[in-house]
Amino acid sequence: MSSSGEMELPSRLPLLLTHEGVLLPGSTVRFSVYSPRNMQLVKHRLLRGTSLKSTIIGVIPDTKDPEHEIEDLPSLHKVGTAGIAVQVVGSNWPKPHYTLLITGLCRFSVSSVLKDRPFVLAEVEQLDKLEQYTSPASEGADGELGELSQKFHQAAIQVLDAVTLEERFKMALPMLTRQIEALKLLQKTRKGNPDNEKRVCFPGRQFNLDEENEDEDSDDTTALERKIYGANMTEAALKVCIKELKRLKKMPQSMPEYALTRNYLDLMVELPWNKNSKDCLDIRAARTFLDNDHYAMDKLKRRVLEYLAVRQLKTSLKGPILCFVGPPGVGKTSVGRSIARTLGREFHRISLGGVCDQSDIRGHRRTYVGSMPGRIINGLKTVGVNNPVFLLDVQGDPAAALLEVLDPEQNHSFTDHYLNVAFDLSQVLFIATANTTATIPPALLDRMEVLQVAGYTQEEKMEIAHRHLIPKQLEEHGLTPQELHIPQCTTQEIISRYTREAGVRSLERKIGTVCRAVAVKVAEGQNISNMESLTPECQGQQAGESSLSQNTKEAPPEMPIVIDHAALRDILGPPVFDMESASLCQV
Ligand SMILES: Nc1ncnc2c1ncn2[C@@H]1O[C@H](COP(=O)(O)OP(=O)(O)OP(=O)(O)O)[C@@H](O)[C@H]1O
């Protein structure tokens, strides 16, 4: 201490030679120490000393400490900063070194070097007062400059060399103006893309480009908080969400974890914890729906009606899960959809074909990169209600993961790995489908009531085609029965000579092909009628470009277009199966 009460620097200071950062009074800078003299300084002075004085060292900028101790000391920059080493961290990786955290105190000039081994010790002269940098105004100014120094190394050295406060401000102002201009420019370039991250990072500090963003962010989390409280979730889920929200508020947006937590909270908010659709079960209507949508399948329809009737009488049905087992295309999914329609519920199909991992069903734990919720929770998010009809196509190994989902005793507290809180699935009506029971794990099979759906006979297929498939395909292709007529004999031919299947999917596809071909004729016919009103030259030009058959070029086809044997061959090509083998393979 001096007589005036101001703190004074020791007249001799050990010197740390740096060439990367510039320490300014009031700022705190991290330095890596590798070179021999600097290492010795840390070992002999900072690590051995016990007094406050032993933590004060001089930092000389713009001076590279030689790699070898035997090399001569380079000429030192004339002005340095005395600083307190507030942290010393040593490491052996990749080579022995220390990292020092030094807070600048005041400037000094080097009067003479007293020794240069094992570390540099010099006689110094204090240039400015210590307490100048503890007053808030100058602290702020120098603090800002400390940050700038990493970008504008040379400029910072000049600021260091400027001893009087006035001189320093003169130096600092142009630098700050440059900084502001750069920020404005950045802002301009980012305005075009609203998705860009609007924060600009500078070492040790984060800036918002505009004040509004801060408000937006806080608005955003406030809105999220409101949604969390409004989502009507379970107590356990609410607790988890509030905890995550607290973490989110403390996190900078640039942190990768911010997006993960945000996604998690968004999902939690979107899930239908307490949102359901009203059941409107009427058994008579259900019978009509099932009969209207499906031909045959009497046994299956009867069992479905029984199931629905019991549901109507006893609302909380913990009955068996129905599992429709049958070859592809026999209408298993279609019956499931009708059940949902009858109940007035949302329908969602989850196919487990190709699923090779249980986490596809149960979700990934959030610790994994790219983790996601499983298909059940995703399905609930999609339908937006907690009581949909879920049609699960069970097959393959991971089907075992459905054990808990399909068990009415357990599924009220189903825990997806991603959510990590229980979600009540007891309101969901699960229906399972499979092509064969052989691929269903026995434990799962045990929890379900299997209803076999057999393949169709030729006669049944004929009925299905004329009652359901042809009207459906006509509608899908924008045609009417007045434009296309498929006689029974043609349907018979499609069934026996162009398809060989237990279900009717392929039959429906072939009918679709016929409809498309006819749609072209009908559309072209409309063009020809329009062309009649055009000039003869135009007609000639357009007819030359057209690929219509000779017949249609001349006149629009007569309605309805009847698909006879020849037309069928023209559209579908030669028959794929011959009659004899078709009759042998009949189901
Ligand atoms: N009995 C039927 N009455 C009316 N249409 C039917 C009938 N059976 C099947 N279909 C129709 O056949 C098409 C295929 O049926 P669906 O998709 O339900 O088959 P699936 O048994 O679920 O097949 P997969 O096992 O391959 O999933 C649907 O368009 C459906 O409407």
Image (cartoon, grey):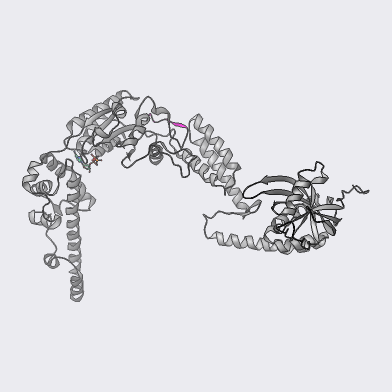
138 is higher (above) or lower (below) than 355: below
Residue at 36%, 26% in the rendered image: 408
Q: Is residue 422 magenta?
A: yes
The residue most toward the left is 580
Q: Is residue 282 left or right of residue 471?
A: right
Left or right position of 27 against 523 = right
Judge whether 180 appears above or below 389 on screen.
below
Residue 331 % position (x, y): 22, 39
Ligand 1 sits in which quadrant? Answer: top left
Image quadrant of residue 179? Answer: bottom right
Q: Residue at x 84, y 51 (%)?
A: 130
* 478 horizontally vs 585: left or right: right
Most foreground residue, 363 or 284: 363
Q: Is residue 72 visible?
A: yes
Query: Between residues 358 and 285, which one lies in front from this camera angle?
Result: 358
Which segment did they paint magenta?
A: 419-426
**Residue extending farthest right:** 3
Measuring from the top left, give residue 109's x and y in whole percent: 83, 59
Q: Residue furthest bottom?
A: 537
Name the spot of residue 586 as percent of width and height, x first.
10, 40
Q: In the figure, residue 124 lies in which quadrant?
A: bottom right
For residue 170: magenta? Answer: no
Q: Quadrant of the C terminus?
A: top left
Instruction: Report whether residue 279 is seen.
Output: no
Residue shown at 54% from the left, 42% from the top? 223
Instruction: Looking at the picture, tell me which residue is in the foreground, 313 or 36.
Output: 36
218 w.r.t. 432: above or below: below
Where is residue 76? Give x, y as percent.
78, 61
